[in-house]
Image (cartoon, rainbow, N blue to C red):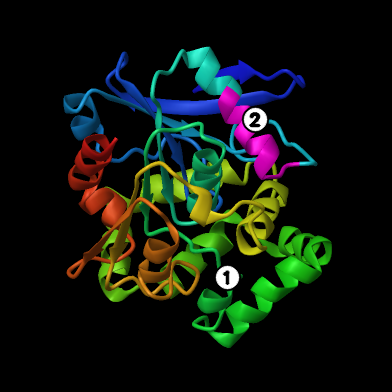
Amino acid sequence: MNYLKLTDGRQLAWHEWGAADGRVVVFCPGAGMAGRFAFGEKDAEELNLRIISVDRAGLGGSDADPQKNFASWTNDIEQLLTHLKAEAPLAMGFSQGAAFAYALASANLVKGLAIVSGQDELSYPATIKQLPEQVAMMVERAGSDALALEAEIAQFATADWLWQMIETMSAEQDRVYYSRGDFAPHYRAALKAGFLQGAAGYARDTILAMAPWPFRLEDVRCPVQLWYGLSDTSPVHSPDFGKILNARLPSAKLNQVADAGSAILWSHSREILMQLVASS
C-alpha cells in the first residue's frame, strides 16, 4: 500500500499494478471496495499502463473526511496526480465508482475515461423512471433527506451485508463468476478492507452517488468508453445498459456485451484497457 499526506493532513492510500513507469490510470473501485483487488495485471503491463487504485476517504487506508464530497475527492486526486507527476492520466470507474470517475473527468483531470458496469446518475429524470420502485424511493431520499438516509445506512451496513447484496442482485452467471475459488476471497477481502473504519465512508459514498450529481455529464469533453454486460441485473447500475448515458455524454462510445454481466471488468479487462488507450 502507498500513502500520500494531503494538504489538510489526511492520509490518502492507494495500491498499484502494471508498468511502474507507465501511463497513469486512476481506478475508482465499486461500492465499499478498497485495497488491492486487481484486474488485467498482465494486460496493463503490456499496454504500459500504471493502474492506481485509490481508497476513497474513509475506506481502507485513507483517512476519513467528514466533509467528503465530489469537490474534495477531485482535490485529493489532483494532489495525487501531482505527486505521481502523471502526464495525460486516464481514469476508470467500476459500479458505484463510476460517479467518482465522472467527477474527475468533469474537473478536467483526466484525458480519457472508461466506465465499466457503472452506476448511472439515477436521479436523472429519464433514468429514475426506469428504476424499481424501492430503488427510486431511495434515490429520492438521497436528494431530499440525505443526512438521515446516510445515518441509517451507516448503522446497518457491513462488509458481509454488502457481499450478500451483491450476490442477491447479480445474475446467475455473475454469481458463478464471483463465487469462484480464485475470485471470491479477493472480492470479500476488498470489502473487508473497505469497512475497516466502519460503515461511514461507504454510507457517504452511497449518498453522493445516488443524489443528483453537482456536475453535468453533458459537459464532460474527454472520450468516455461505456461498458455494460447485457446480463447485468443490478438495479443500481444503468437500467438501460448505458443508452441514456451514451446520449448525454458528448464523446461516448457504448459497448454492450451480449454474453457478459457485471463481472466484465475482470472477464474483458484487455479489451477495456486497449480501447481506453486507443481513444485517448
**Dot 2 surroundings within 10 Å: few (below 14), some, or many (20 or more)?**
some
Picture disc at residue 137: none
Give the label, 2 or 1, closer to the camera: 1
Q: Residue at x 53, y 14 (%)?
A: 83
> Of the residues shown, which amino acid type is indicated by label 1?
Tyr
Classify residue 64 by image quadrant: top right
Badge 2 element: helix
According to the image, label 2 marks what residue? 75
Left or right: 246 in relation to 34: left
Residue at x 51%, y 75% (from the top left corner): 127
Q: In the orientation shown, which residue stands out farthest toward the bottom?
A: 133
Choose between 64 and 119: the one closer to the eye.
119
Evaluate whether residue 57 shows in this view.
no
Tag 1 or tag 2, which sits nearer the N-term? 2
- Which residues, given as a range, are shown in magenta? 68-78
The residue drawn where x is 52% and y is 40% is 34
Q: Main secondary structure of the magenta part?
A: helix
Q: Position of residue 11 (x, y in %)?
A: 67, 23
Residue 259 image offset from top left, x and y in percent: 17, 69
Q: Is residue 189 above or below residue 184?
A: above
Q: Tell me the quadrant of the picture where the C terminus can be found.
A: top left
Q: In this rendering, would 128 be left or right of 271?
A: right
Q: Is residue 84 above or below residue 232?
A: above
Out of 44 and 200, give the one closest to the viewer.
44
Q: CA distance from mark 2 to mark 1?
A: 25 Å
Residue ID for mark 1: 124
| Rendered location of residue 14, percent (x, y) | 50, 28
Does dot 1 land on a helix, a strand or a loop? loop
Give the side of residue 114 with respect to residue 102, left or right.
left
User: Which amino acid lies under the numbered mark 2 shown in the image of this protein?
Assistant: Asn
The correct choice, above or below, for 241 with respect to 213 in the image is: below
In reply to whether residue 167 is colored magenta, the answer given is: no
